[in-house]
Image (cartoon, coloured by chain):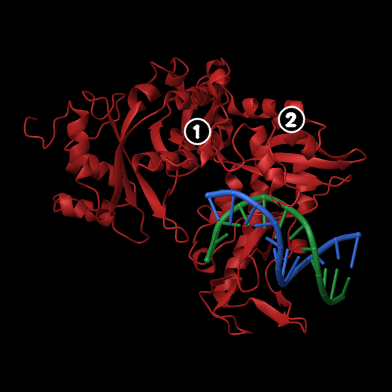
Chain colours: A red, B blue, C green
Amino acid sequence: MTDLPYNQSSQESIVSYAMQLVDKSLREVIDVSDLDQNSLNKGRFGQILEEYYFYKELDSNSQPDFPEAGLELKSGAVKKLIRKGELRAKERLVLSIIDYNDLVTQNFKTGSFYMKNAEMLLVFHLHEKNTNVLDYIVKLVGIWAFPAEDLKVIEHDWQLIKSKVENGEAHTLSEGDTFYLGACTKGANASSTRSQPNSNIPAKQRAFSLKPGYVNHILAKISGITDGSFGKLVTAPDLDLAEYDIEQIALDKFKPYYGKTPEDIAHMLNVGYNPEAKHRFAMLTKEILGVSSKQEVEEFSKADITIKTVRIDDKNLPYENISFPAFAYEEIVKEDSWELSEFNELLEKRFLFVFFKTTKQGLLLNKVLFWNMPYADRQEAKSVWLKTKQLIIDGNIVKKVEASNIRRTYFPKKSESKVAHIRPHATTTQDIYPLPVPDKLTKVTSYTKHSFWLNDTYIRDSIYL
DNA sequence: GCATGATCATGC
DNA sequence: GCATGATCATGC
């Protein structure tokens, strides 16, 4: 192996060789003549890259792919956001498979996960539907080493996964258990299982993976984007905490403010409070968490956690339904699976709900909780998504236009599902997105922006509790 | 009083 | 100018 086009003991050499991939496809840089054309499913991208570009033999040992340089080669897919033009992770980044029997014998720092993945050479290509893997265009290449503060969260995640396995609960693992490092299912189907220690129940095969939110941060870092739009939940004094649980750290921050009014809280935090600002409660929540009202919480963004601040009346009914960002009609009709749809991705995230409740003493901070939408409710949301998508595909949007110019639509109403409905989400009726199919009744080719909303009654009955 | 449609205030 | 989080107005 003396004639490799790079020096395999030098990170610098490996990276500069990898950088030559940017804006190219595999077909342009390797000899593809002896590849079996029938085996080119999307999972082959990484294997072909490793075997035909880096000339490495495929193996599954616990050493990194470039052991002398301490680098593990990983490839991932990005997508371009139509509305913003930015690159985002198409999905989680799947790392090494979890051997349940081995895991329970390991420590984090010397265990196979960290030994293999401490430093990674990442190659991201742009995902294109119905495109041969050989023609995917590489967009970003870079080295990733976990920052110390991220490693603390990841070690905490790793320990949680390990302790579940130690307790004979490998079959109950779920990605929602953890923050940055997940245990995602891996295998052809649900019957891909493995044995686990301390239980006879076969457990689904799983791999360590990085959450999409975390991958987005990696993408920003290796693209050289460092903006000030993120603030940290965990600051220096907390870094030495033995129990590094970002959820607990977040919940603890609310403790001094229970039973206080928004004005009280703003005063205690020494921050301004504009009663005219419609997002004043959301701003206050961020200040409680220790970041500026202008910033996003970095740890939550990495862990795919969404904050929702809700005011409820004395009967626990929210004053308003909860909105999500407006969807683009042209994008939703192209979503061919619920699992990969934007709405499902929003609902699979973990939520931090912050409730302010109306009492005799006024509006008071009342309850704060982390929450995930149960599977059955996401199936319910799926039917709302399916109906919405079909109406747009059929150009069946406006039902009638009243004398007042209010337009009644066919979109799913609150009464049709206990979970979610569709409503306008725009500045005016003139605030529009193009329609893929003109509306049958009005013939318009664009329509007021709409979004999915969670029903106020669903918040009351299934989340506030 | 509630469901649905329309619109607003802010910050970037 | 627009995304976000939120609130208002109308009609039944």
- Pointer 1: residues within 10 angstroms few (<14), some, or many (20+)? many
Count of number-bearing discs? 2
Q: Is residue A389 above or below residue A310?
A: below
Q: Is residue A279 above or below residue A186?
A: below
Q: Please name the amino acid that badge 1 sits on.
A: Tyr
Q: Which of A366 and C9 is in front in this view?
A: C9
- Residue A29 is situated, as x and y percent measured from the top left of the image, at 16, 50
Q: Nearer the viewer, residue A159 or A185?
A: A159
Residue under circle 1? A180
In the image, what residue occupies the spot 79% across and 30% down? A258
Q: Is residue A405 left or right of residue A39?
A: right
Q: How far apart are marks 2 and 1 (CA)?
A: 32 Å
Quarter placement of the C terminus of chain A: top right
- Residue A163 is situated, as x and y percent measured from the top left of the image, at 55, 20
Q: Answer whether labels 2 and 1 touch (C-beta < 8 Å).
A: no
- Residue A421 visible in rendering: yes
- Does dot 2 land on a helix, a strand or a loop? helix
Residue under circle 2? A268
Quarter placement of the N terminus of chain A: top left
Q: Nearer the viewer, residue C4 or A377?
A: C4
Q: Please name the amino acid that badge 2 sits on.
A: Met
